[in-house]
Image (spheres, grey):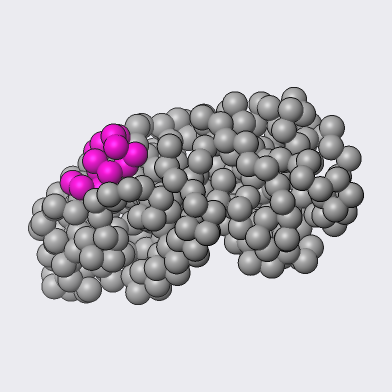
Amino acid sequence: MSSFIQRTGLILSLCGWLSSAHAQNTNNAWSPVEKALASDKFTLVAPFPPGGPVDLLARMLAEGLQKIYSQTALVENLPGAQGNLGMDKVKRAKPDGHTLLVIPAGNLTINPTLMKNFPFQIDRDFAAITMIAKAPNVLVASAQVQVRSVKELLELAKLKPNTLSYASPGIGSGLHLAGELFKQQAGLDLLHVPYKGTAPALNDVLGGSVPLMFSNLPATLPHIRSGKLVALGITDSVRSSVAPDLPTLQEQGVKGVVVTSWYGLLASSGTPAEITSQLAKDAVWIFSQTPIKDQLKAQGLSEVLQKPDEFAAYIAQETLTWAKIIRSKHIEAE
């Protein structure tokens, strides 16, 4: 999403809403946990290059924490090893809540099974704080394919078995696994066509070379609105506020395909529960402010409010879901 690069206005917009009582705590009003958090600077580790959603969310959090605690809060972009470099820094950090990890779902729930010799055990090496935002995914068809709904797709697949295929950004990507989960739940036999990135995959679906694709809704919405792509269903349990007219796959009879692009906040293992709980409250507050919610919506994102234990349970459950798919389909990282 190139629009994620446009973050200057977003950062400036934070200043106006940080005049609330939450941001005006004095040392005398703070709890012992808040005083501990206000005792040192924050580092928000984003293990991917600047300009993407991870970087943007990290900067939103950094600005908010800086105003809340009157402490310096910096974003450190540490790309490398598919995100593992940044994860390793946070794993080794002092468990005091001042070094935090902003990370997408795949690094927490897919890579542990997909990658050989994955160097982390998520529940052992990190302390979950909260999911902070998510974006819906959508099953789209090329306009050249004569289907306008999941029902029509299922009928076409039965009429022409073993002929339909779907594109993905690469083997083991979340969107690849979304396709495998859809195949399993719908009882279809679709051929997977992997690409090296979203852009080439999307281009071939637009051109009709590949009929289907699971993709991020914000990235495909312009093509859906122009008629170049047909949206068949949202891969979430509820409709998206970005496109409320689009039905979910579940509404159309395909249960259990809930695959969103989400982003989480974690600290190093051993961080006290009272610290992660306070940081979760801080994150929830930051991302619930109207200017931030508006900025998120403009990027196709919505805030997600979770307590640390809820987030930890969600990570564990989704990891099990993807592990079953990866192992049953014998999927290996490229």
Which residue is painted at 32% across and 42% down in the image? 83
State whether the magenta stretch is mostly helix, strand or loop: helix
Q: Note whether residue 260 is visible.
A: no
Judged left or right of residue 157, residue 116 is left
The magenta region covers 75-89
Q: Is residue 69 above or below residue 89?
A: below
Q: Report which quarter residue 252 is drawn in.
A: bottom right
Judged left or right of residue 277, residue 41 is left
Q: Is residue 229 above or below residue 274?
A: above
Q: How many marks?
A: 0
Query: Front-most of 293 and 331?
Result: 331
Q: Note whether residue 171 is visible.
A: yes
Query: Front-most of 119 and 101?
Result: 119
Judged left or right of residue 190, residue 93 is left
Query: Front-most of 197 and 280?
Result: 197
Which residue is painted at 22% across and 74% down in the image? 274
Q: Report which quarter residue 209 is drawn in.
A: top right
**Residue 171: x %, y % from top left:** 51, 41
**Residue 157: x %, y % from top left:** 82, 50
Q: Report which quarter residue 19 is drawn in.
A: bottom left
**Residue 243: x %, y % from top left:** 71, 50
**Residue 102: x %, y % from top left:** 33, 49
Which residue is painted at 69% across and 67% down in the image? 255
Query: Front-most of 21 and 69?
Result: 69
Which residue is painted at 45% across and 30% down in the image? 5
Task: Give the quadrant of the C terminus.
Answer: top left
